[in-house]
Image (cartoon, helix red, strand yellow):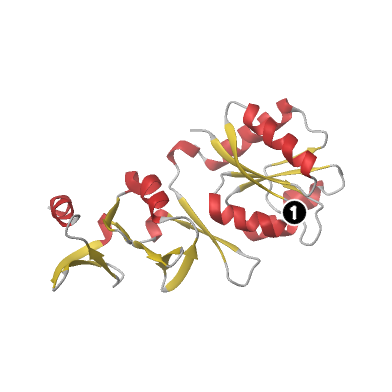
């Protein structure tokens, strides 16, 4: 599986060139682009990239400031026309620092390092990223932390450690990428982690599953036979 890369640069031509270069490598493909740190936070929450190619100098929040908010993932590779920020960049846990104009071979090596740091992108547990309502912080969760995803108007909601989070990623998208990790669609608006189901309750309208964190999710009549089979 190829690395998923987000390109962040305030110069449109530089951004387009990097997108094209990423797509020319054998180990990665671009999943989005952003012109500043705030757009980048939205794109990270929406696309859950493995790697961010991040410009250092941008209007408003700098790339280094954004990188310090991201934690261990996505992996950051800084791109810049200036060499004097290297120490600051590596202090922010960047895996590499590329000075423009960037050569394809150097970009490929940086992406190789990013893949090594991820510890094998093909086998990693899926991540869910959300941006705090306050604006500047992107939070990263792993799939095993979530017992249930459910539709909430135009968002998908989930709870971790008692706190609810919202993401624009759809239930259909979650179902597709989390099926191999034990998540089952039990209702049009409900996706649950099968290993976290503790009971199945009959209701006047059908059934509900009780999850190990106390949440309950509706089960449609259509999904009920398959769920019962899986729970045996």
In this rendering, the answer to whether 22 lies above or below 188 is above
Left or right for 107, reference 14: left
- Taking depth in this image into account, of 113 and 147 the one nearest to the observer is 147
In the structure shown, which secondary structural element does the residue marked by tag 1 occupy? Answer: helix
- Taking depth in this image into account, of 175 and 199 the one nearest to the observer is 175
Left or right for 93, reference 189: right
Q: Which residue is mark 1?
A: 63
The image shows residue 229 at horizontal and vertical percentages of 13, 50
Please give the name of the residue rendered at 63% of the width and 27% of the height, measured from the top-left corner: 25
The image shows residue 77 at horizontal and vertical percentages of 69, 43
- Taking depth in this image into account, of 136 and 93 the one nearest to the observer is 136
Quadrant of the rendered structure where residue 65 is?
Answer: bottom right
The image shows residue 133 at horizontal and vertical percentages of 58, 71
Disc 1 crowd, CA 10 A, few/some/many (<14, 14-19, 20+): many
Please give the name of the residue rendered at 73% of the width and 48% of the height, measured from the top-left corner: 90
Please give the name of the residue rendered at 77% of the width and 57% of the height, measured from the top-left corner: 62
Please give the name of the residue rendered at 34% of the width and 62% of the height, measured from the top-left corner: 148
The image shows residue 144 at horizontal and vertical percentages of 38, 56
**Label total for image:** 1
Left or right for 223, reference 151: left
């Amino acid at each position: 599986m190829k690395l998923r890369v987000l390109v962040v640069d305030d110069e449109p031509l530089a951004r387009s060139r990097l997108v094209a270069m990423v797509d020319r490598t054998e180990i990665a493909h671009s999943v989005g682009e952003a012109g500043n740190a705030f757009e980048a936070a939205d794109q990270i929450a929406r696309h859950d990239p493995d790697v961010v190619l991040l410009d250092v100098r941008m209007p408003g929040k700098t790339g280094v400031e954004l990188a310090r908010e991201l934690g261990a993932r996505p992996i950051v590779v800084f791109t810049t026309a200036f060499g004097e920020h290297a120490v600051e960049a590596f202090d922010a846990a960047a895996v590499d620092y590329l000075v423009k104009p960037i050569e394809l071979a150097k970009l490929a090596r940086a992406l190789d390092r990013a893949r090594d740091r991820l510890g094998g992108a093909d086998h990693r547990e899926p991540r869910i990223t959300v941006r705090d309502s306050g604006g500047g912080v992107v939070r990263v969760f792993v799939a095993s932390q979530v017992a249930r995803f459910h539709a909430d108007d135009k968002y998908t909601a989930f709870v971790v450690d008692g706190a609810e989070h919202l993401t624009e990623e759809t239930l259909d998208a979650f179902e597709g990428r989390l099926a191999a990790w034990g998540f089952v669609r039990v209702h049009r608006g409900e996706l649950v982690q099968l290993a976290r189901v503790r009971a199945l309750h009959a209701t006047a309208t059908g059934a509900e599953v009780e999850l190990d964190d106390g949440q309950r999710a509706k089960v449609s009549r259509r999904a009920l036979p398959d769920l019962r089979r899986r729970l045996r």
